[in-house]
Image: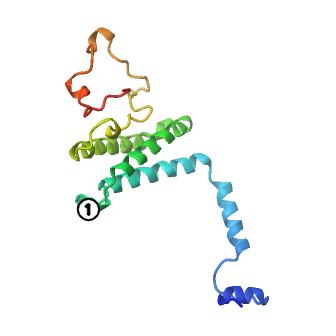
Amino acid sequence: MSTDPVQAASASGVDEPSGQPSEEELRAAYEAEISRITSADMILQSVVSLLNIGGHRLGLSSQGGMAAEESSRDLEQVRDAIDGARALMPILERREPENLRPLRDALSQLQLAYAREAGASGTGGPSATPPAPPPGADRTPGGAQSQAPPAEEQPAGPGPAQSSGRLWVPGR
């Protein structure tokens, strides 16, 4: 015999008006929601959630602008959130590239904050370098790609900052 009154009422064939939707009503509501939502909506929500959790784990969402407690900081989770958001951005770029500026800006700010924290915590090295900027971040306002300077203007090898592993360089 069950101790759950709802289960007991259902088993006995008695419908108890508990104000809770039935399983069929929940299923219908879920199917209606799935029919309404697009995969792009879900990807966008995922990117926003990743950026929010990354900011929270970095201490950017603390009340009063104060840094988060050390126990809630987790640079590994921040890096994973950045990598995840960056991986999803090209999919969103195919749909609505003109509306993604706020997301690109938020991702860039999170990357910069991560780079500062990773450098300050002394976890430098190849595994702690921040990820590359999101696709499209190097575009000019007109939408054209920015061009790299000619090869003769680029240094012959890595400079002292680059070889130390502490300077993030796009494309490397």
Q: Foreground: 155 or 107? A: 155
Q: Foreground: 86 or 45? A: 86
In this rendering, the count of numbered labels is 1
Q: Quadrant of residue 60?
A: bottom left
Where does residue 16 sit, x and y in percent of width and height? 70, 89
Where does residue 160 sit, x and y in percent of width and height? 20, 24
Q: Please report the residue visible at 50 percent of the width from the left and 51 percent of the height from the top.
A: 46
Give the residue type at disc 1: Glu
Q: Foreground: 133 or 73? A: 73
Q: Is residue 37 above or below residue 64?
A: above
Q: How busy is the neighbourhood of tag 1: few (under 14 within 10 Å), some, or many (20 plus)?
A: few
Q: Is residue 1 above or below residue 156?
A: below
SS at badge 1: loop
Q: How is the image coloured?
A: rainbow
Q: Foreground: 98 or 121? A: 121
Location of mark 1 (residue): 69
Which image quadrant: the C terminus?
top left
Q: Please report the residue visible at 31 percent of the width from the left and 56 percent of the height from the top.
A: 73
Q: Please report the residue visible at 69 percent of the width from the left and 89 percent of the height from the top.
A: 2
Q: Single out the residue that lies furthest toward the right.
A: 13
Where does residue 145 sit, x and y in percent of width and height? 42, 23
Q: Quadrant of residue 123?
A: top left
Q: Please report the residue visible at 56 percent of the width from the left and 35 percent of the height from the top.
A: 94
Q: Single out the residue that lies furthest toward the top.
A: 152
Q: Quadrant of residue 69?
A: bottom left
Which image quadrant: the N terminus?
bottom right
Q: Is residue 132 left or right of residue 120?
A: right
